Image: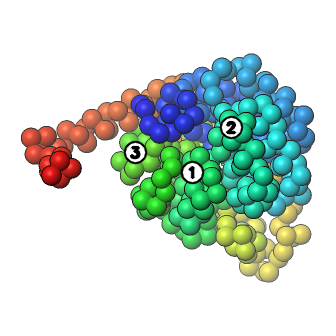
Amino acid sequence: MKTRMTELFGCRYPIQCGGMLWIAKPSLAAAISNAGALGNLTSGNYNSADELRAAIDETRQLTSAPFIVNITTMPSIRLPVELLQAFFRVCCEKKVCAMEIAGAPVDRFLGPEFLPMAHEAGVKVLHKVGTVKHAVHAQKVGYDAVTIAGFEEGGFPHKDNVSTLVLVPRVVSEVDLPVLAAGGMANGRSLAAALSLGADGIMMATRFLATRESEVHPNIHKVLMEKQEYDTSLNLQSLLSGFGLQVRALSNAIMKKVEEVEKAGGDLTDLLPLISGERARAVWKEGNAEEAMLTIGQSVGLIDDIPSVSELIERMIMEARETIHKTHGLLNTDDEPWKQKSTA
Ligand SMILES: Cc1cc2nc3c(=O)[nH]c(=O)nc-3n(C[C@H](O)[C@H](O)[C@H](O)COP(=O)(O)O)c2cc1C
């Protein structure tokens, strides 16, 4: 499957893993890249430039295939701007295949010198955005690709609440860069649909969380198989709408508490103990899915098994091909008016 995405990143299949704090580490990234998709090494897992350097080396020992490094450009106490700038420099120094920037654009958040720095090093930079306006900005300032994420996505969707089905064709019409579709992607039919909408590939995260290589407690895998598309909710608007964002997370006991605190007018100090990343880190390991904010997408409704990464990717590619083939079979190929139109 050759698309502008596979050409840009040099991967076999047009499927990327999205950034996942505490999850997207060398072993999972390498498993995904070895299976022909684009694995993700999430820089937020590390506390220093040296730690990220070591993680890039470790991933390279596990795979010779390309992978992408996520840098989440959002205000954070643990990951101040200076550290994110250092992460960016490490990616350039190590000449990784690409960076996935999620959050504020690099030119504004890190500085105008950063995108040219990446290009000089031969590193591609993709921007994950949630609106058409931000995709257009990404093209204007020189990103190499965009991921457009609908509000189905786990994590931090835009507050506009627009679905992937509408955002992808909108961005494809407005931007002349490789476009990845994200939010609600989980199987080969998702991939076929995204390609039909004009995308060059897909990005998914929740589906990769539900693979044998993601290092979470078995109970988390069980929860991912049981939960349905209606089992996530949008939260933290009081805290995040100033940034244009909100959080989609699994509906659970903690998120109920978060809702109560927000309704009572609580602020960051009240909310932080409930939503901290450290809490999520413990839950991924220990398995009680009620006890932390778990950023899971609506795509959880499409998950009912825990395959290995390579089984998942092979199955997706087969299913996408079959779907495209079936769709093509609906056409009467003697009558192809668009061909006449293009030669007229
Ligand atoms: C467990 C988990 C952790 C995530 N952590 C991050 C992160 O650190 N940075 C980021 O940009 N996105 C993060 N995301 C969002 C994903 O990269 C992606 O945008 C989103 O999950 C896509 O929707 P899907 O999960 O339905 O495929 C996370 C998602 C999940 C499931």
**Front residue of this view, candidates 64 and 326:** 64
Q: Nearer the viewer, mark 3 or mark 2?
A: 2
Q: Residues within 10 Å of mark 3 (few under 14, many from 20)?
A: many
Label 3 CB less than 8 angstroms from ligand 1: no
Where in the figure is residue 99, as x and y percent of width and height?
A: 69, 42
**269 horizontally vs 173: left or right:** right
Q: CA distance from mark 3 to mark 2?
A: 25 Å
Q: Which residue is mark 3?
A: 195
Q: Are marks 1 and 3 in contact (CB under 8 Å)?
A: no
Where in the figure is residue 339, as x and y percent of width and height?
A: 18, 46
Where in the figure is residue 267, as x and y percent of width and height?
A: 84, 74
Q: Which residue is mark 1?
A: 146
Q: Amino acid at mark 3?
A: Leu
Q: CA distance from mark 2 to mark 1?
A: 15 Å
**299 horizontally vs 83: left or right:** left
**Front residue of this view, candidates 117 and 331:** 117
Q: Which residue is mark 2?
A: 123
Quarter that holds the N terminus: top left
Q: Nearer the viewer, mark 1 or mark 3?
A: 1
With respect to residue 32, does 45 lie above or below? below
**279 horizontally vs 148: left or right:** right
Disc 3, SS: helix
- Specify the color scheme: rainbow
Label 1 CB less than 8 angstroms from ligand 1: no
Q: Residues within 10 Å of mark 1 (few under 14, many from 20)?
A: many
Label 2 CB less than 8 angstroms from ligand 1: no
Disc 2, SS: loop
Where in the figure is residue 60, as x and y percent of width and height?
A: 73, 22
